[in-house]
Image: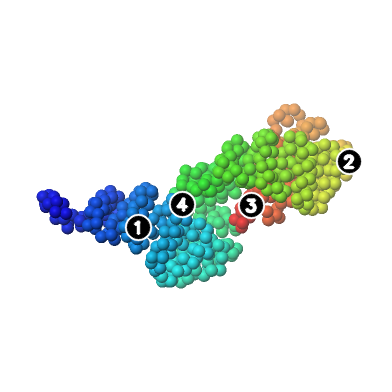
């Protein structure tokens, strides 16, 4: 002590002032100064009180933690506890550091110890409640937050905090009560208006949800999440222009929030603006996304690539999703559909088979695989899968339609008609099924029996090009040349890519080779050898799913018919169903 004093005096320093300077450094907010000052204090050893040494360890640990040096921080907090076990600050800070390391059981143990030392430590209750909430132990979190309110008094942020836990538990009545209490205490609490809006949204009260989100925006025009939440309501109401305006505003306010880019990407995808969707998903990927967020981004971008026939890119994105979660049946089925479009049927079947292994009671995966088998002319396995699909869901009109088409393809027309009859019985307004039955009668050599079905298909859907093509073939074999020519021409007017109609006009002398070669053409669907068969399947499938509440059915339609007539409607319905689940 005398030697140290002599040295300080020799340097012209007052030891009391030097100690004060060290504490100023130790209690500063600058990393280097904290380390320097606290180290000086700790070097004094027992000349400092146990409590002061504990404080120095705590401050130095805090600096390490803020610099992401978590292990060094934990060592400091532990030393502080050893020096002065009655000080709860080191327990709390060590608990927070364990939480940063995702060692939450150790964090909870430290907060619990702090509470045991000081049962009135509101910080420890708050920290422990936060970790319980993070772990999904909602009842324990609620217990801590309720105690927190008693210790700190009735404050808006505390009711909001507890309300969020009730919301996470889907206990909407107490959640609503807590958010309302927060607003009662602080009528300018914009976040609580927003959260109350989310409760009303979950309760399917769109009007009140919209009012709450708008009130939140009125209270705080800079609250980006309120715009994003309100956009959800506008989309549910098919007010897409208003929704997009809010999506844009959310991004304007917080361009570093990846969720806003992904949500706008979903909006563009549903609106069939696939290139814009791809751009937004790609932007979101450059930001700080969770692993789940990345899966959403790649999945959405993959579906967008699929829609613009960039199937290789779609496969690549779905593969990234599956690397994160190999059991994601949605990604498996979607990648299978992309492989299907690339005529990589073995790969498609492999993905559908994995989906079946994971969810063997899902009828949709069987008919998807059956369709792939059918595309590669493996009719036997196709029929087996359609049989299984029907066993699982005997009311699925599609499965009967698809199996009927396979029976027709192998010349088992009686079996085909039986299945098509059942499909129509289950869904009497299925345009495609009438058309398919008409075509089956035509192929069976019973064209006259198919004419009423072709007429019915056109009556149900006057813009069904495949139905006009089918009726034209029937008129042709019945010797009704003028009617056949008129229907072939109508079919090509609606869809210039139907090669069978061009051939029909040529047979009937109504089109020259020059006219045929000059006619506008679309790329043929690589999945089908006969265009009319593809459209029959599409129309039949849409008719069977349009009133469904199962999002998987609409997703299957979109995967199978990415350029189908009802794509826009299917996407809107799918979006609504996904939000409701």
- Of tags 4 and 1, which is closer to the observer? 1
Q: Nearer the viewer, residue 375 or 143?
A: 143
- Of tags 2 and 3, which is closer to the observer? 3
Residue 564 visible from this viewpoint: no
- Of tags 2 and 4, which is closer to the observer? 4
- Of tags 3 and 1, which is closer to the observer? 1
154 relative to 542, above or below: below
What is the number of the mark on residue 81? 1
Percent across and percent down for residue 124 are 41, 63
Q: What whole-number distance in Å separates the C-alpha atoms at marks 4 and 3?
A: 36 Å
Splitting the image into 4 quarters, where does residue 44 fall?
A: bottom left
Secondary structure under the numbered disc 1 in the rendered image:
helix
Q: What whole-number distance in Å separates the C-alpha atoms at marks 2 and 4?
A: 71 Å
Percent across and percent down for residue 59 are 31, 55
Q: Is residue 316 left or right of residue 93?
A: right
Percent across and percent down for residue 534 are 74, 40
Splitting the image into 4 quarters, where does residue 58 fall?
A: bottom left
Which mark is first along the chain, 1 or 3? 1
Q: Nearer the viewer, residue 64 or 274?
A: 64
Quadrant housing the C terminus: bottom right
Q: What whole-number distance in Å separates the C-alpha atoms at marks 2 and 3?
A: 40 Å
* Residue, disc 2: 446
Badge 3 crowding class, 10 Å Cα cut-off, few under 14, some 14 to 19, many 20 or more, is many
Secondary structure under the numbered disc 3 in the rendered image:
helix
Q: Nearer the viewer, residue 311 or 452?
A: 311
* Residue, disc 4: 102
The residue positioned 70% from the left and 33% from the top of the image is: 519
* Residue, disc 3: 574
Q: What colouring style does the render use?
A: rainbow
Q: What whole-number distance in Å separates the C-alpha atoms at marks 4 and 1?
A: 21 Å
């Amino acid at each position: 002590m005398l030697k140290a004093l002599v040295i300080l005096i020799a340097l012209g320093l007052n030891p009391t002032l030097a100690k004060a300077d060290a504490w100023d450094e130790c209690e500063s907010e600058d990393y280097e100064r904290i380390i320097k000052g606290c180290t000086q204090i700790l070097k004094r050893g027992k000349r400092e009180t146990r409590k002061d040494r504990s404080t120095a360890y705590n401050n130095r640990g805090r600096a390490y933690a803020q610099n992401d040096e978590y292990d060094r921080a934990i060592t400091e907090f532990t030393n502080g506890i050893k020096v002065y076990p009655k000080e709860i600050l080191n327990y709390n800070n060590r608990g927070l550091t364990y939480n940063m390391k995702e060692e939450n059981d150790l964090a909870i143990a430290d907060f619990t110890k702090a509470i045991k030392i000081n049962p009135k430590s509101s910080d420890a209750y708050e920290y422990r409640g936060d970790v319980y909430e993070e772990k999904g132990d909602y009842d324990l979190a609620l217990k801590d937050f309720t105690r927190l309110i008693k210790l700190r008094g009735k404050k808006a942020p505390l009711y909001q905090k507890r309300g969020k836990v009730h919301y996470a538990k889907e206990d909407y009545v107490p959640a609503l009560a807590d958010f309302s209490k927060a607003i009662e205490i602080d009528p300018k609490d914009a976040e609580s208006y927003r959260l109350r809006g989310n409760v009303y949204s979950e309760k399917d009260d769109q009007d009140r949800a919209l009012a709450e989100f708008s009130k939140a925006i009125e209270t705080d025009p800079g609250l980006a999440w309120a715009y994003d939440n309100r956009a959800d309501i506008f989309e549910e109401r098919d007010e897409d222009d208003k929704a997009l305006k809010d999506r844009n505003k959310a991004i304007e306010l917080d361009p570093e929030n990846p969720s806003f880019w992904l949500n706008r990407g979903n909006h563009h995808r549903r609106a069939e603006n696939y290139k814009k969707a791809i751009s937004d998903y790609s932007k979101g990927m450059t930001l700080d996304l969770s692993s789940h967020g990345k899966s959403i981004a790649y999945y959405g971008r993959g579906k967008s690539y699929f829609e613009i026939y960039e199937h290789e890119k779609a496969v690549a994105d779905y593969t990234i999703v599956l690397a994160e979660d190999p059991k994601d049946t949605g990604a498996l089925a979607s990648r299978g559909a992309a492989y299907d479009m690339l005529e990589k049927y073995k790969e498609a079947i492999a993905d559908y088979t994995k989906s079946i292994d994971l969810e063997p009671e899902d009828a949709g995966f069987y008919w998807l695989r059956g369709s792939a088998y059918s595309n590669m002319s493996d009719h036997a396995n196709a029929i087996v899968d359609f049989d299984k699909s029907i066993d699982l869901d005997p009311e699925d009109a599609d499965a009967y339609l698809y199996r009927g088409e396979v029976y027709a393809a192998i010349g088992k027309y009686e079996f085909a008609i039986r299945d098509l009859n059942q499909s129509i019985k289950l869904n009497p307004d299925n345009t495609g099924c009438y058309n398919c039955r008409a075509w089956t009668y035509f192929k069976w050599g019973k064209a006259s029996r198919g004419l009423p079905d072709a007429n019915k298909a056109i009556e149900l859907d006057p813009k069904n090009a495949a139905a006009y093509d089918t009726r034209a073939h029937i008129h042709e074999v019945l010797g009704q040349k003028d009617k056949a020519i008129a229907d072939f021409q109508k079919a090509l007017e609606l869809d210039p890519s139907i090669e069978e109609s061009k051939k029909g006009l040529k047979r009937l002398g109504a089109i020259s080779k020059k006219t045929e070669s000059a006619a506008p053409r679309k790329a043929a669907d690589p999945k089908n050898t006969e265009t009319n068969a593809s459209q029959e399947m599409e129309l039949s499938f849409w008719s069977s799913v349009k009133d469904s509440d199962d999002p998987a059915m609409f997703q299957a339609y979109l995967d199978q018919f990415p350029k189908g007539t009802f794509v826009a409607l299917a996407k809107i319905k799918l979006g609504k169903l996904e939000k409701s689940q």
